Image (cartoon, helix red, strand yellow):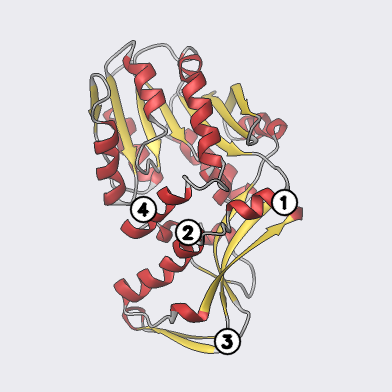
Amino acid sequence: MGDSLRKVGQRELPSMYLYDELGTALFEAITLLPEYGLTRAEERLLRRHAGDMLEHLPPPVAVVELGSGSGRKTRWILEALADREPVAYFPIDISAAALIKCHQELGNVGAISIVGLEKSYLEGLQEAAARRRPNQALLVLFLGSTIGNFDPPAAEMFLRDIRRHLKPGDALLLGADVEKSVHDMLLAYDDPAGVTAAFNLNLLARINRELEGDFALGHFEHHVRYQEMDCRIEMHLRSTRRQTVSIRAADFTCIFREGETIWTEACHKFRVEEIPGIARRTGFLCEAQWIDTEWAFAENLLIAD
């Protein structure tokens, strides 16, 4: 993702590295915060409409989830599927801790077979697709508006990459957070309790733990901004003073100016009406959309063309 976000003169760290064991736990806590309505909106849609979504997909179906996390939201899809057929579920995550939690969360769903894949999205998808039974369709879940972590050209490139691993008739359920008031969007990524700040700063703590870095966490602060032209929330870590940081394991040293930032995550927000066009350009047809109105969020069922 770092390549997709690069700005000249802007220091960056890829957001995938936010999710070590502690980072994963902190993100789970973020999803429970009153300011972060995204996860609850998606859970409402899945709880209310999982059966409707599956009506578009004749059996047999195997479910593959890109970035499963704990799998809490996925339960609604899997339980609805278990009502009609045995469930084959392939959660994909780079975090071993997340996959363990996923097994714990979903192991009691009907007649379910869970094969966790500790891999990147596309590597895991390739393996899951190779494991499908003859005549079995794939339902790929890409939830949580993770697609918004890419800038638009990179997002479409990634969707094309997903499509290359699918057969015609396979499906992608794509969660997309929708534009809303700037105040609500900023608050969702900068909560008063400081949980999101701790999540962001843990990235530097992880570098210290794993790569012998010497980041002084007290000399960086969580910073959030909204780029109106790009409809994008950005998370940064801002240096509060001029300082020098070394990462021994990478043989790397850099000097930060006061106020200089490290860009750690981007969260693009969508318009509902733009998603069918994105689908067409990337080899899919937008079969159906379900919209949450309490916290603007869209669940989009895309069928591989």
Q: Is residue 138 visible?
A: no
Q: CA distance from mark 4 to mark 2?
A: 11 Å
Tag count in the figure? Answer: 4
Residue 68 position within the rendered picture, expressed as x and y whole percent measured from the top left: 38, 40
Horizontally, residue 237 falls left or right of residue 61, namely right
| Mark 1, residue position | 182
Q: CA distance from mark 4 to mark 3?
A: 30 Å
Q: Of residues 277 and 87, which is closer to you in this image? A: 87
Tell which tag, 2 or 3, sits nearer the viewer.
2
Residue 286 position within the rendered picture, expressed as x and y whole percent measured from the top left: 60, 24
Crowd class of label 2 (few under 14; some 14 to 19; many from 20; radius 10 Å): some
| Mark 3, residue position | 241
Q: Which comes before the other along the chain, label 4 or label 1?
A: 4
Crowd class of label 4 (few under 14; some 14 to 19; many from 20; radius 10 Å): some
Q: Pointer 4 and pointer 2: residues touching (CB < 8 Å)? A: no
- Give above or below for 85 relative to 128: above
**Helix, strand or loop at mark 4:** helix
Q: CA distance from mark 2 to mark 3?
A: 23 Å
User: Which residue is found at the position 63% from the left and 27% from the top?
Assistant: 291
Using the rendered view, name the quadrant where residue 73 is placed: top left
Crowd class of label 3 (few under 14; some 14 to 19; many from 20; radius 10 Å): few
Q: Amino acid at mark 2?
A: Val
Q: Which comes before the other along the chain, label 2 or label 3?
A: 2
| Mark 2, residue position | 195
Q: CA distance from mark 4 to mark 1?
A: 27 Å
Q: Which comes before the other along the chain, label 2 or label 1?
A: 1
| Mark 4, residue position | 25
